[in-house]
Amino acid sequence: MSSRTTTTAGTLARLGFAQPDRATSHLADPALAPLAAGDGAHGLPDDLLQAIGDTADPDQALLGLVRVLESLTRQGETADLQALVTELRGDGPGRDRVLGVLGASSALVDELVRHPGHWVDAARAQRHTAEETRAELTAAVTTDRGSRTPLDALRISYRRGLLRIAARDLTSPDPVAEMPAIGEALAELAEAALEAALLIAREQYGEGHEQCRLAIIGMGKTGGGELNYVSDVDVIFVAEPAEGADEETALRIGTALASATMQACSKPTPEGSLWPVDAALRPEGKNGPLVRTIQSHKAYYERWAKTWEFQALLKAWVSAGDREIGLRYKKEISPLVWEAASRENFVEDVQAMRRRVEQHVPANEAARQLKLGPGGLRDVEFSVQLLQLVHGRTDESLRSATTLEALSALAKGGYVARDDAATLDRAYRHLRCLEHRIQLHRLRRTHLMPDQPADLRRLGRSMGHRKRPDEAVLADRQAVAREVRRIHERLFYRPLLAAAARLTPDEAGLSPEAARARLLALGFRDPAGALRHLEALTSGVSRRAAIQRTLLPVMLGWFADEADPDAGLLSFRRVSDELGSTHWYLKMLRDEGRAADRLAHSLARSRYAADLLIRSPETVAILGDPNGLVPRSREALTATMRAAAGRRDSGADAISAVRAIRRTEVLRIVLADLVGELDVLEVGAALTDVTAAALVVALEAATAEVERREGVPLGGDLLVVGMGSLGGAEMGYASDADVMFVHRPHDAADEAGVQARATLVVQELRRLLTAGATEPPLALDADLRPEGKNGPLVRSLDSYRTYYERWALTWEFQALLRAAPVAGPAELADEFVQIIDPLRWPEGGLTEQQVRDIRLLKARVESERLPRGADPGTHLKLGRGGLTDVEWTVQLLQLQHAHERPALRVTGTLPALAALEAEGLIAAADASSLREAWFLGVRLRNAGVLWRGRPVESVPVDLRDADGMGRIIGRPAGDGAGLLELWRRVARRARQAAGFNFYDSPPRGSVVP
């Protein structure tokens, strides 16, 4: 018995046959006898068998070859048979084209069996021009039809053209690259068929048809020159009366011709049918007249058309019939298409339509849908068409009916990133190739990936895969779909589109005249200066200028939403000048979510944000990160800062790296605050985390620097205790870091030496954090330490214990209410907290003398610390009803009751106030008044820094400043005067509540119901 490797079945399996035993029987078929050769061990020449094995489906190709040869023999076409045998025995492109068709399309095999002589069309397939194709089909139904009926002649000639296209497609060395040419050839073939069908319709109508000038406008993929192998052909019919004819007669004749044209294409005959002609895209759809005049079309689109109809008209093309009438139609309708994006809610309507299309895909088909599903062809087409309609109003280079041409123009014009455009281009070609090959198999209209292994294997092999083709083709398609969906969601839902669509064409075009008028209308105080900035940003032919011309018409409106649009535009120019040549900056603003929107509003709303961005322009990338406005945790910040510091050689360089990270994080918080992503409590907590992390790493760096300089270890542990807003996790943008420093010598260490070195570390820490630092500053304030400015900068743990036991004053216990260790060893932090807890939560509460001390000190603060000339009615911290009133009231009640109410043992003002209310120690109405004042006071102090770039202690009397600060906290534009009124009202209630609860009154509320 011969070895399996030498058997015919084994050879066929190695060549790619899926059913080698069945194929072996086909090789013995007498129809193949003319091809038999003595050198072929398996009945056919080895090179021919190899060529069959190279097709998409070798089993189908072999069976098809048997059937075609049988048909030629049966029909007695001896010359054709011999010619085909000669072609197949030769090694050339003709053989590959014939076999390629046989292996890919069972439907075209059937066609070749009916008309076996048409194998020549496949073997000699060349690209025909549109004119040649049209001439061939029109001749087929007129002068060359012989004894055939016109409909059969049309079908036979059409399929010969289809056979030529398929042969070229299936044997292309790069079918993905060839796809646009194939789609165009299919569209030209369909247009030629429409022209021929119209000739048939005129012949059927007879005398009088010439009274109607009928044009057929191709729509959809036909109009776009990107048709499938099997598709409805979308059309619109336009009719005008010929000279001397009346309109009514012309429309009646035109309707008859249009109906007959549609029938000529779709009616079944012994030669089958072509495809349905779908005129449902006409005005009023299927309920409207089949044929209209140009003026009737125009009137409808001007008054009644919906958004989707203008999107459909992007593809309108004169496909057949009277070309002059078609071009007149285009001339009248095109301006309406490019004005459509200015309609109210245009972008939102298109987006909603895409969602509806996707929702109507059956759930069991969604994963297999090449056309309508997520990541499919419609994602690419809708993205391109929406961008065309919005930006094509002012840029005529975008006005292409073909998807890939339009995509290329969008990339060239800077509307789409070049890498995104390249990805979508490849993906679209790939998906269309898959669609073509799936449809070619049986010439059936489908957009579903097959789910049967044999079909997937054929599809994979037709796409060039030979190893596990069924798995490879699925993997390719899934990867493409993911990329398409990712880019589609970014392009299709970018906020810039909706905003751009709301501009008039003049505004979107940004001509100098239109820009000057718009700047005035938007409220720019210095339109001439703003115009100079626009010219600097948009002049020239660079891609950078092109993208700026897309961004700025929209961003001008966003700048103008805020109180200082001039400053916003100037800052944007300065940031753009620094970053405009980078590859990611303008791309981010154009493509990434709300990046441009948020940048424009932040720059025009906040001088502080603008200053931070101008100092570190690259940090604008925060806006392009989906999580860019989420504050980082203290642990993550500490790790990042520690890693950065660890890569530096000196303490100064280490702290410089820490400061740079802190600047970025403060900007992150600022931007999140400005766009409403953080409330005031979250801002305070985030700023506290950034400061604490910086102190942790800076303390380590300062310690290492001193130890290096002194040549000896520190000899102890060093702790930084946060006080004030740092300890309470309520820092603002202008807050200093209130701190105390505690050391504990190691066993056997010299305490005096440790004290001296610890002092050097603290001094080095303060120096490093402030030396040469740009905004935002990080000033360390140690005035709350024992003995204040007169006491040592750092003390030992035992020294703190002794001081607090013997000499501390009541105000120092009050200050300890907000003490929280932020840097240093956890064990030392715990020991320090154990020392101070009995002092800030004193057993039995406060003595009467201590209460009097606090009240007296509060009075002194009000009278002595309020700046000269400051209005106590508007000062946010020290004024009547200000932050001091709220905080001292809360702290007094904590000192009095925390020993017996553990819920009060918190360092933050608002958590303590909430606990006091929950414990019944303060009336709900009073708690609400105090809380409202605290919130408003902190928000206004933060808003003052954001707006002016420096601390603001009082509610501004300048209306422009009040308006700017008011907008930041959510007040209406132009309501600067109302801000002062708001503060006075809120502060008055808080003052009443503070006075009642601070001065020994029972907790029944300051206002009697």
Image: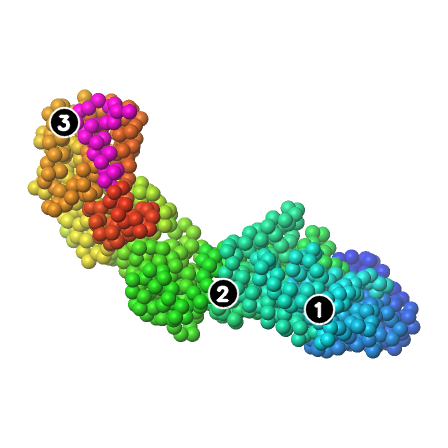
Q: Secondary structure at mark 1?
A: helix
Pair 1/3: label in front? 1
Q: Residues within 10 Å of mark 2 (few under 14, many from 20)?
A: many
Q: Please tell me which residue is depicted at 40% across the width and 64% down the height of the picture.
A: 552
**Is residue 883 depicted above or below 447 in this figure?**
above
On whether residue 990 falls in the magenta region, the answer is: yes
429 or 1005: which is nearer to us? 1005
159 or 260: which is nearer to us? 260
Quarter occupied by the C terminus: top left
> Label 1, on which residue?
247
Q: Please tell me which residue is depicted at 14% across the width and 27% down the height of the picture.
A: 851
Q: Give the mark, 3 or 2, whose residue is nearer the N terminus.
A: 2
Pair 2/1: label in front? 1
Q: Residues within 10 Å of mark 3 (few under 14, many from 20)?
A: some
Q: Which of the numbered marks, if any, corresponds to residue 190?
A: none
Give the alpha-carbon distance from disc 3 to disc 2, as whole Å: 70 Å
Q: Which of the numbered marks, if any, corresponds to residue 391?
A: 2
> Label 3, on which residue?
851
Q: Give the mark, 1 or 3, whose residue is nearer the N terminus.
A: 1
Q: Position of residue 663 (x, y in %)?
A: 28, 54
Q: Position of residue 732 (x, y in %)?
A: 25, 45
Q: Please tell me which residue is depicted at 40% across the width and 74% down the height of the picture.
A: 540
Q: Amino acid at mark 1?
A: Glu
Residue 541, quarter of the rendered image? bottom left
Quarter occupied by the N terminus: bottom right
Q: Secondary structure at mark 2?
A: helix
Q: Is residue 657 left or right of residue 449?
A: left
Region in magenta: 983-1009
663 or 547: which is nearer to us? 547
